[in-house]
Image: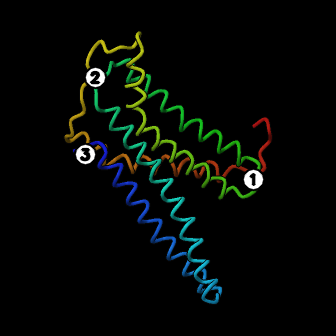
Amino acid sequence: MSPFRLPAAAVRAAILGGVVVGLADGIRAAALARAPLLAFLACVALTLGFDLFVAAAGGVALALLLWLGAWGHGRSRGRLAATLGWVLAAAAPAGATVAALTGTAARNNRFLAAGVVGLASLVAAVAAALSGPALGRLLGLLPGLRRKSDWPSPRPGLGAAGVLVLAPLVALAVEAAVFFLVWRTRAPLRKSL
């Protein structure tokens, strides 16, 4: 299977989703406003254009991450380079969570703040999970981290199936814990906290 098939499918699906959502949003908004025909068409066109642009940008970003993940798994690398790649990739979700928490600390709406922090950490965690192998492969190119022993190539098996079943549940539990911790924090927070 070509490493470009899944990223290309992600872009196509995102564009198709943007068209469907944009049409539905535009028609609904124009119908609720009881707009005349010219305003109706303008509303549908503007909404379709915006939704298509956002969906295409998200699809391209996801395709890039999927391609990076496939590229990172495409070649064996040393254990030290792979470990350092995962450590560097793991810094992204931690940094995104701290940045989102700092940015929403002064908001009185803790429910909204908790949602922003939860979404930021989840998106950064997915990006880190897909880019970790690519960082390891890049670090493997450095002279001091060149491959000394082969990293075992991943072979799908029962362990991979178990991870695929448990990973969404673990991610949901972690995100729920982050959400409730931020939501239950009394606002506004002091600067020292």
Does residue 70 lie above or below 46 as drawn? above
Instruction: Quote the CA–CA distance across marks 2 and 1.
Output: 46 Å
Which one is earlier in the sequence, the residue at label 3 or at label 1?
A: 1
Q: Nearer the viewer, residue 182 or 38?
A: 38
Q: Which of 68 and 109 is in front in this view?
A: 68
Dot 3: element: helix
Does residue 77 lie above or below 25 as drawn? above
Does residue 86 lie above or below 165 as drawn? above
The amino acid marked with disc number 2 is: Trp
Q: Is residue 88 left or right of residue 152?
A: right
Residue 24: image x %, image y %?
Answer: 50, 77
Dot 2: element: loop
Category of crowding for the residue at label 1, using alpha-carbon neighbours closer than 10 angstroms: few (below 14), some (14–19), many (at least 20): few
Q: Name the residue under label 3.
A: 161
At 50% from the left and 47% from the top, the residue drawn is: 122
Instruction: Quote the CA–CA distance across marks 3 and 2.
Output: 20 Å
Q: Name the residue under label 1.
A: 107
Dot 1: element: loop
> CB of mark 3 within 8 Å of CB of mark 1?
no
Which one is earlier in the sequence, the residue at label 3 or at label 2?
A: 2
Mark 3 vs mark 2: in front? 2
Q: Quadrant of the C terminus?
A: top right
Mark 2 vs mark 1: in front? 2
At 54% from the left and 65% from the top, the residue drawn is: 51
Q: Quadrant of residue 54?
A: bottom right
Tag of residue 151? 2
The amino acid marked with disc number 1 is: Arg
Residue 102: image x %, image y %?
Answer: 70, 42
